[in-house]
Amino acid sequence: MADVAGLSASIHLQDVAQTTDELVQSIRDAARRFGRTKAVVALSGGIDSSVCVGLAVRALGPDRVTALTLPDKESSSETSGLALEVARHFGAQPIERDITGVLEALGCYADRLAVVLRLDPDFDPARDTFSVEFVPALGAGDRLPSFSLNVVRDGESTRHRLGGRAFLTIMAATNQKQRVRMMLTYRWADEHNGLVIGTSNRLELDQGFFVKHGDGCGDVFPLRYLVKTHVFELAAHLGVPESVQKRTPTTDTFSAPQTQEEYFYGAATETSDDLWLAYYNRDDPAAVAQRHGLTVADVEKFFGVYRRRAAYSDYLRETI
């Protein structure tokens, strides 16, 4: 049983080795409980899924773990290489399947492009790229956090306010990527009597940074009580390749390169983790503001975002 109180005390783990052993045991327990003899991880080449591969290999052995990589035409050129490096490093079986054709058939790219063209009629997918960004609205004034469409053309970014049906259409189409990946992950698991290792971490699950019936699915979630900084500490302990440890966390979702800070969190990893734990522990906003060089109003804005996202994520987690 995870020591949730202990894991909530700091963005740094008290005992990395002990935490690792407990997470490895949680995978073994799940495999025994569900009668599964193997495991599969949807491996993106990012820090969370890479750590999950390392944990699964320790739990079940390398011959019983498959690392399934499912890129599409908008995935980073680094994705496949990093995923293969991680799989080989831990001795897991690497499998790659490109899902571009499936997404094209579902209208994922065409539906998003139609929205982009309404906001930026000069957009040319052969020349330009785009992403969706979170705007935390810090600083003076009563502006509300929002999202924007970021169009990159000739190295220059142009941002368009994104809301209402346009935002919902882009996100609904984009969410098909994670749902197709999870469908194929369970396809493998069903055929091989495998356990699907969920790769979401604590902030993702609490704040709704996952797709319902997509990357929010899994049979066991070893990272469910760990913030991202904890995951990086686990990565160092497990020996995840340096190329992954040093890489800034990305979304790998839109045609334009984008960090998770730009897309969802609005702050760098350690700052975001500490702000969320302060919110979770009901710390005094004034003390948190002083610690991070922010205004009290800015901290309260972050806390407000966390409250609203936590309420919405209840819907995302409700499945049965």
Image: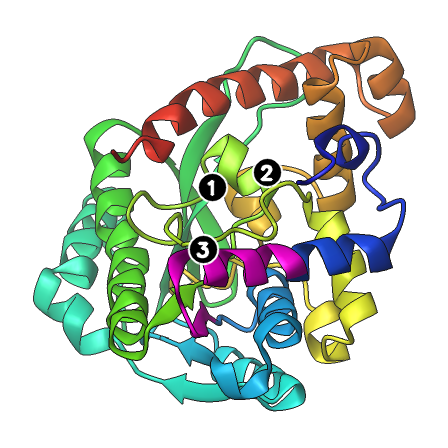
* Position of residue 107 in the picture relative to residue 160 (left or right): left
Residue type at tag 2: Leu
The disc placed on residue 33 is 3
Disc on the earlier residue, 3 or 2: 3
Please name the residue shown 57% across and 75% down the image. 60
Q: Position of residue 108 (x, y in %)?
A: 18, 59
Mark 3 Cα shell of 10 Å, populated few (<14), some (14-19), many (≥20): few
Question: Would you place residue 290 above or below residue 243 in this image?
Answer: above
Q: Amino acid at mark 3?
A: Arg
Q: Is residue 37 magenta?
A: yes
Q: Amino acid at mark 1?
A: Phe
Query: Closer to the observer: label 1 or label 3?
Result: 3
Q: Which residues are magenta?
A: 25-42
Question: Does residue 234 lie above or below 74 as drawn?
Answer: above
Q: Would you identify the image quadrant in which residue 312 lies?
A: top left
Visible residue check, residue 98: yes
Of residues 264 and 11, the one nearer the viewer is 11
Residue 232 visible at all? no
Is 19 magenta? The answer is: no
Q: Earlier in the sequence, mark 2 or mark 1?
A: 2
Q: Position of residue 271 (x, y in %)?
A: 77, 37
